[in-house]
Amino acid sequence: MERVKDKVCIITGGALGIGRACAERLGQEGAKIAVFDVLDAEGETLAAELRGRGINARYWHVDVASERNVQTAIDQVAALFGGVHVLVNNAGIAGVNKPTHEITEAEWDRVQSVNVKGVFFCTKHAIPHLKLAGSGSIVNLSSIYGLVGGPDVPPYHASKGAVRLMSKTDAMLYAPDRIRVNSVHPGYIWTPMVEHHLLDSGATDLDAARKAVGDLHPLGHMGEVDDIAWGVVYLASDESKFVTGSELVIDGGYTAR
């Protein structure tokens, strides 16, 4: 129950899905939790639920594509909680599912602004606080599609490849400051984003579609949000003190082919 005791953890996109699970598990293990999202009702509800369990938690409305919004919120977290020790860059959108030649510039840019610039802005403004703390951990949520290709959602796949290499670059840049940076690569996890992706892809029977996608994984099923959250807890904790610039693949064997 104390794997990240008293660490101040920021989780972007923390109101739902993987982000919510990360907030819950990090809080359960002793962290102080800052939830960033644009889903105010869900974010406020989560923060209240965490406080009801004795976890020090607060919600901030943050659009990670806005540098001013990000900087203000991170500075407020540090002032309220007394520092920042962990940043989980989880916020992301899937974007349009079209072939590359049909995607508009605006559709492309929207995905990159959240999935790539969002990671950049949050990392940029967390680093000074992590340096002040004397060490820290940044966990960037990439995807199996930051490792392998797929014939759909080109902007999303490009963004997750970028996140993978941004993680390695920052791991090397900030190692002298004892700041570790790693990427996590989930397979298909049953979340609202995946559900919407299946519906947008034309699925009419969600249960059948979930099973079909699950069958793409050697373990024969989709993952659950906690499968990812516990990996994030490990990377946030001192258990992973010699791990940086690495890819934690949690994909049911999807990329083992």
Image (tube, grey):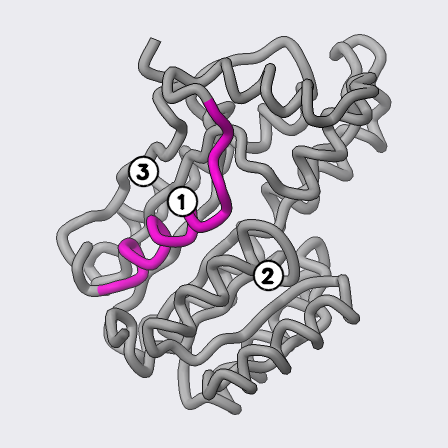
**Type of the residue with mark 1:** Asp
CA gap, disc 3 and disc 2: 20 Å
Mark 1: which secondary structure?
Answer: helix
Residue annotated with mark 2? 14
Going by the image, does 76 lie left or right of 134? right
Of circles 1 and 3, which is in front? 1
Residue 248, disc: 3
Going by the image, does 19 lie left or right of 70? left
Mark nearer the N terminus (2 vs 1): 2
CA gap, disc 2 and disc 1: 16 Å
Residue annotated with mark 1? 227
Q: Are marks 2 and 1 in contact (CB under 8 Å)?
A: no
Mark nearer the N terminus (3 vs 2): 2
Find residue 11 and report its horizontal and vertical position in percent: 52, 63
| Residue shown at the point (38%, 57%) measured from the top left | 138
**Type of the residue with mark 2:** Gly
Q: Which residues are magenta?
A: 221-237
Mark 2: which secondary structure?
Answer: loop
**Type of the residue with mark 3:** Leu
User: Is residue 52 depicted above or below 138 in this figure?
Assistant: below
Of circles 2 and 1, which is in front? 1
User: Is residue 123 depicted above or below 231 in this figure?
Assistant: below
For label 2, the crowd category at 10 Å Cα-Cα, with few meaning under 14, some 14 to 19 and many 20 or more, is many
Depth order, front residue of 151/132: 151
Q: Is residue 161 visible?
A: no
The secondary structure that dominates the magenta segment is helix
Q: Is residue 152 visible?
A: yes
